[in-house]
Image (cartoon, rainbow, N blue to C red):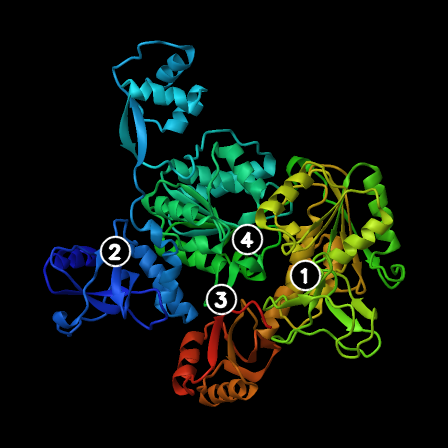
């Protein structure tokens, strides 16, 4: 008898004690009594009393028998009528909690994001055709009867729409008894995808890659495939065939995308291949839609989900494949409450449930490349663009030789090419990964700099909104006319460019061009989607954008990409700076020439000899990866070593530093593990809290979790405003 069936059998009796994991930062589940007649099993979603309120939770496996008198325990209030979390899902949540050193309840909370979906959706009013016929026939009535004459129940509005008539015609027939009222299930949030809806258009390399991938999928069992293909090589169409194979086997598919809320073009491509869009899952969904998706995923009615990183924690009924598109993207790292990398956790979830996972990128992460080289992942390479479309010709603009005009940021070389592109009726993209108008505003008279009162960062000017804003805590103030320090009028200077300032410069040079600025802080998701669609239709000449333009968009008329400041990502101490710069610039320049038009990419740089710049313009990605992998191996940095970050914050600098030093003193002496710090974090003040950081550096086989737990256990207890934030495998070093 299995553990699940044993617990179910036991729960049929009175005075049974079960463990319930509640969505709060508790170190372990709480014990509750199962009332007479209630049936629960591990994974059941229940409602339990916690202090003065009722909360939801999940029945969990108990590590050891509870010796407490059942009558002294609070009883479970309710068992929700929804599928229980599977044993694989519970094992996954336990694994994530243990690996990230997070409270299990907070991890379980990510799987229970839609409490209103725990109960079944209510049935809706429907109409079904009877034997009765109206006393007077009209063409509209005949169309309605003919449409409904298949035994299927219809909604009032649905029947009227299908028959091409008004709802009043339906009401008249219902009044005469032609239709009877029935209850019907709520409609699915999306239609079922059809793997045979269209036949794929694949060419030589794509066809071969798709065949290899489908063979891997059809073998079933756990595997990791890495699709490594240049931009425009047909990677999406290749993994669509893996999705089709999984759907034919009757299983569900999860597609993770870094910016699903902005990728309407992906949803349309999916619909063209499978006849229906996938269900979406991201933070911008309406609450009611989130509830419907969560419920229908758990019952298996939704077959494919395309979602952001949190979709990894949806309770799939029969998940059989995970696709991680743009697997290198930093957006897969969550840095709030539970710190995890969705790409890595996707591999873990697939291993636990024994099904395949596919990682996809034109510029794979160093970690994934190494895993491919070592045979842990199966590499699938796409070396050419679909339809033999040529890659853009790439060149460097040495800003020391071709500087911009005074007060400008675009070199004459780039401006000349923009002019040529617009004259041809094609599109130019100017990329700058910096929001707003200028990153710093200062007074020319006294040197006063506008700084956030809550963070150790400068206020960014947003001229379109006439605001100075902090991008860390959200603080903002109206852009003043006088210096608050010396009172001088009209002597405030904007230092450095943001996309708004580049747009201003472009409008001076090309006043008749249609210009669009794409930045996440200028508009909501719906507006961004409309702007992206407009660009794809050719309704803009010059696009100025931040990194969101690098997220897999397909702009048919885009033939020029200009990188305004290619050096911007290299100017920090992040060990992944070179890798991220290479990935971002490669992705951005890959927006050009995707439909076969002759295209050009220009990178403005003050460091033309930097290995990243040389690797991009030469097209020799292998040389870059070889160099980067060698550097990582020498320094024992991931994937050849392991890192863990500990951030200590408090309301006062002394409290934060004192607690961090106490942890340092309590750290165990372990061979192969080095503790660095504490040191003031680069962002020493965020949201009014002072921050100190420690960095744990160990070998690949080091037990970082045990080391950190030992340090925390032996170290000082958190008191007052002190908070400790743990990040295993950190991506950010701020």
Q: Residue at x 37, y 21 (%)?
A: 170
Query: Which comes before the other along the chain, label 1 or label 3?
Result: 3
Nearer the camera: disc 4 or disc 1 = 4
Query: Which comes before the other along the chain, label 4 or label 2?
Result: 2
Q: Residue at x 83, y 71 (%)?
A: 489
Q: Tell me the residue that label 3 is attached to.
A: 336
Residue at mark 4 to residue at mark 3: CA–CA distance = 16 Å
Give percent across and percent down for residue 483.
78, 74
Query: Which comes before the other along the chain, label 2 or label 1?
Result: 2
Answer above or below: position of 153 versus 452: above
Q: Tell me the residue that label 4 is attached to.
A: 258
Give percent across and percent down for residue 419.
85, 44
Q: Residue 705 vs residue 10: left or right?
A: right
Foreground of the two, 517 or 724? 517
Q: Residue 592 vs residue 130: left or right?
A: right
Q: Badges 4 and 3: C-beta atoms under 8 Å apart? A: no
Residue 128 picture quarter: top left
Q: Residue at x 50, y 29 (%)?
A: 198
Query: Which comes before the other along the chain, label 4 or label 3?
Result: 4
Give percent across and percent down for residue 78.
22, 56
Residue 469 seen anywhere in this rendered image of the structure: no
Residue at mark 1 to residue at mark 3: CA–CA distance = 24 Å
Residue at mark 3 to residue at mark 2: CA–CA distance = 27 Å
Query: Which comes before the other along the chain, label 3 or label 2?
Result: 2
Quadrant for the N terminus in the image: bottom left
Label 2: which secondary element: loop
Residue 194 picture quarter: top left
Answer above or below: position of 173 versus 78: above
């Amino acid at each position: 008898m299995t553990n699940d069936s044993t617990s179910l059998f036991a729960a049929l009796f009175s005075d049974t004690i079960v463990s319930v994991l509640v969505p709060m930062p508790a170190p372990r589940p709480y014990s509750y009594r199962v009332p007479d007649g209630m049936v629960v099993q591990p994974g059941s979603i229940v409602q339990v009393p916690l202090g003065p309120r009722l909360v939801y939770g999940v029945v969990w496996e108990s590590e050891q028998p509870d010796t407490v008198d059942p009558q002294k325990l609070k009883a479970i209030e309710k068992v929700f009528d929804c599928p229980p979390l599977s044993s694989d899902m519970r094992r996954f949540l336990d694994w994530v909690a243990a690996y990230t050193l997070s409270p299990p309840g907070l991890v379980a909370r990510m799987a229970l994001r839609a409490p209103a979906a725990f109960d079944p959706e209510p049935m809706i009013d429907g109409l079904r055709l009877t034997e009765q016929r109206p006393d007077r026939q009209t063409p509209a009535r005949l169309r309605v009867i003919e449409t409904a004459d298949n035994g299927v129940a219809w909604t009032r509005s649905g029947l009227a729409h299908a028959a091409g008539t008004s709802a009043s015609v339906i009401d008249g027939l219902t009044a005469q008894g032609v239709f009877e009222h029935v209850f019907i299930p709520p409609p699915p949030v999306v239609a079922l995808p059809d793997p045979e809806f269209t036949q794929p258009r694949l060419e030589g390399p794509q066809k071969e890659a798709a065949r290899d991938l489908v063979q891997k999928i059809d073998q079933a069992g756990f595997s990791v495939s890495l699709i490594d293909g240049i931009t425009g090589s047909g990677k999406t169409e290749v993994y669509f065939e893996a999705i089709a194979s999984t759907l034919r086997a009757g299983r569900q598919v999860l597609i993770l995308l870094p910016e699903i809320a902005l990728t309407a073009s992906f949803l349309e491509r999916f619909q063209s291949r499978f006849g229906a869009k996938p269900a979406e899952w991201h933070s911008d969904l309406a609450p009611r839609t989130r509830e419907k998706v969560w419920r229908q995923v758990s019952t298996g009615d939704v077959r494919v989900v395309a979602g952001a990183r949190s979709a990894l924690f949806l309770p799939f009924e029969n998940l059989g494949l995970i696709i991680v598109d743009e697997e290198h993207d930093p957006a897969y790292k969550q840095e709030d409450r539970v710190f995890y990398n969705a790409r890595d956790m996707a591999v873990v979830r697939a291993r636990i449930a024994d099904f395949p996972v596919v990682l996809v990128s034109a510029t794979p992460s160093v970690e994934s490349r190494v895993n491919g080289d070592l045979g842990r992942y199966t590499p699938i390479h796409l070396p050419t663009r679909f339809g033999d479309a040529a890659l853009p010709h790439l060149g460097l603009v040495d800003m020391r030789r071709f500087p911009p005009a005074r007060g400008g940021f675009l070199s004459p070389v780039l401006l000349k090419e923009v002019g040529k592109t617009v004259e041809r009726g094609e599109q130019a993209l100017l990329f700058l990964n910096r929001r707003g108008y200028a990153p710093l505003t200062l007074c020319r008279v006294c040197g006063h700099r506008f700084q956030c009162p809550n963070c150790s960062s400068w206020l960014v000017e947003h001229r379109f909104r006439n605001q100075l804003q902090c991008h860390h805590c959200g603080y903002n103030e109206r852009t003043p006319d006088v210096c608050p320090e010396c009172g001088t009028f009209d002597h405030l200077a904007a230092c450095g460019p943001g996309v708004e300032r580049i747009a201003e410069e472009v409008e001076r040079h090309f006043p008749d061009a249609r210009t669009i600025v794409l930045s996440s802080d200028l508009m909501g998701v719906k507006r961004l989607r409309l702007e992206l669609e407009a660009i794809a239709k050719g309704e803009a000449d010059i696009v100025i954008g931040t990194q969101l333009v690098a997220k897999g968009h397909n702009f048919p008329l885009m033939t020029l990409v200009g990188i305004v400041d290619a050096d911007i990502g290299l100017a920090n101490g992040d060990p992944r700076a070179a890798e991220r710069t290479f990935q971002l610039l490669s992705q951005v320049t890959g927006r050009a020439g995707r439909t076969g038009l002759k295209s050009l990419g220009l990178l403005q740089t003050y460091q033309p000899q930097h290995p990243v710049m040389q690797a991009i313009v030469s097209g020799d990605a292998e040389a870059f990866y070889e160099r980067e992998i060698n550097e990582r191996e020498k320094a024992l940095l991931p994937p050849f070593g392991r890192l863990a970050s500990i951030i200590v914050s408090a309301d006062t600098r002394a409290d934060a530093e004192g607690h961090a030093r106490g942890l340092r003193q309590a750290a165990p002496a372990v061979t192969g593990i080095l503790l660095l710090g504490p040191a003031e974090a680069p962002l020493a003040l965020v949201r009014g809290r002072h921050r100190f950081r420690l960095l744990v550096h160990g070998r690949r086989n080091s037990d970082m979790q045990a080391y950190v737990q030992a340090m925390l256990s032996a170290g000082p207890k958190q008191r007052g405003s002190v908070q400790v934030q743990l990040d295993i495998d950190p991506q950010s070093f701020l």
